[in-house]
Structure formats: structure tokens, C-alpha cells
Image: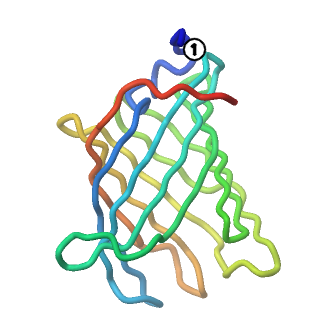
């Protein structure tokens, strides 16, 4: 398979490309705190966007997988002046558009649009922070949902376990 060259517009977020795995913690006023495992994949096909998929699963106290948790998929587009657009879809009936900025190996995103189906849980806003720290991808996610104000929900540390990921989109 020929490996497509990364589109030059993606240079500011090129550090994301690959497969990442790790663990994190979650909590929110409406749920009990928990530990989770995660796999994140950023791929590309030579066009000016990254594809993105995240899968998470509940971990027990020993660190073993208990059951699947959240999944999200979408696309990350780098804009001029280190600006960034991210479109995400969730199987729970929620879609989000984030706007943000890349500064070196740090990405900060805020929801611009949140849309929900009639059966989705109430969810109104989010803030995400990603950073490359000592070769690991660290991220934190704040959300406003279920009548709660914007506050911490999830954070994790992921290690890169694979480099280029081909995208068929």
C-alpha cells in the first residue's frame, strides 16, 4: 500500500496521526466516578483533514475491561492561523462542532454547535484540551449536561502504539 503524504495544511496537528491507547478517569455530579480504557485513531488520506475515532470501555479495579462505554467519530480540519474545526458524531444521537486553536503541541477546543436527537440526553456545551507531553497524548474534557454547568468530566493519558493510519474516506 502506498502511504499518502500528509497534506501540508495539517502540519500543526501532524503529531496526532497514529493509534493511541491508554487509560483515564471520569466523573460528573450525575454519575459515580470511574476508570476507563481508551483507543484513539487519527488517520489521513492525503486530503486536508484527519479522520478520528475514539472508543472507550469501563475498567474494573484490576484494570480489566468490563463493558464498552462511549464511541465518537469525526474529522479534524486545520484552518489558517493555527485555527481548527472538529466535527464529531456520537451513536447516542449527539453531533458537535468544535472551534479551536493549535499552539505548538497544545490544542484547545470549544463547542460552537451541539445538536441532539429527541432521544439523546440533554447536553449543551463542551471544552476539550489536548496536549503532547513527553511523547504521550494527554487530554481533558469538560461538559455541560443534565442541567449541570460546564465542568470536568473526563481526562486520560494515551501512549502512541502505531504510526501512520490509512484513511479510506
Write down the residue under mark 1: 7
**Quadrant of the image occupied by residue 12:** top left
Is 28 on the left or on the right of 7, as rendered? left
Q: Is residue 5 visible?
A: no
Above or below for 85 versus 29: above
Is 102 on the left or on the right of 87, as rendered? left
Q: Residue at x 52, y 31 (%)?
A: 43
Front residue of 145/17: it is 17
Q: Position of residue 2 (x, y in %)?
A: 54, 9
Label 1 environment density (alpha carbons within 10 Å; few <14, some 14–19, many ≥20): some
**Quadrant of the image occupied by residue 67:** bottom left
Q: Position of residue 45 (x, y in %)?
A: 61, 21
Q: Residue at x 31, y 58 (%)?
A: 156
Front residue of 146/163: it is 163
Above or below for 117 versus 15: below
Q: Residue at x 17, y 36 (%)?
A: 134
Q: Is residue 125 visible?
A: yes
Q: Secondary structure at mark 1?
A: loop
Q: Position of residue 165 (x, y in %)?
A: 48, 28
Q: Residue at x 55, y 63 (%)?
A: 126
Residue lying at the far front of the rendered structure: 1
Amino acid at each position: 500500500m502506498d502511504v499518502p503524504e500528509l497534506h501540508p495544511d495539517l502540519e500543526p496537528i501532524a503529531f496526532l496521526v497514529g493509534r493511541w491507547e491508554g487509560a483515564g478517569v471520569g466523573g460528573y455530579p450525575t454519575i459515580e466516578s470511574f476508570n476507563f480504557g481508551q483507543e484513539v485513531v487519527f488517520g489521513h488520506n492525503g486530503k486536508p483533514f484527519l479522520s478520528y475515532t475514539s472508543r472507550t470501555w469501563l475498567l474494573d479495579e484490576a484494570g480489566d475491561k468490563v463493558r464498552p462505554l462511549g464511541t465518537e467519530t469525526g474529522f479534524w480540519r486545520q484552518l489558517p492561523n493555527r485555527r481548527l474545526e472538529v466535527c464529531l458524531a456520537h451513536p447516542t444521537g449527539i453531533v458537535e462542532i468544535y472551534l479551536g486553536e493549535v499552539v505548538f503541541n497544545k490544542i484547545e477546543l470549544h463547542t460552537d454547535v451541539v445538536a441532539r436527537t429527541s432521544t439523546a440526553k440533554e447536553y449543551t456545551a463542551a471544552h476539550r484540551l489536548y496536549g503532547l507531553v513527553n511523547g504521550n497524548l494527554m487530554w481533558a474534557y469538560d461538559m455541560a449536561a443534565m442541567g449541570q454547568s460546564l465542568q470536568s468530566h473526563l481526562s486520560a493519558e494515551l501512549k502512541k502504539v502505531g504510526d501512520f493510519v490509512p484513511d479510506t474516506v
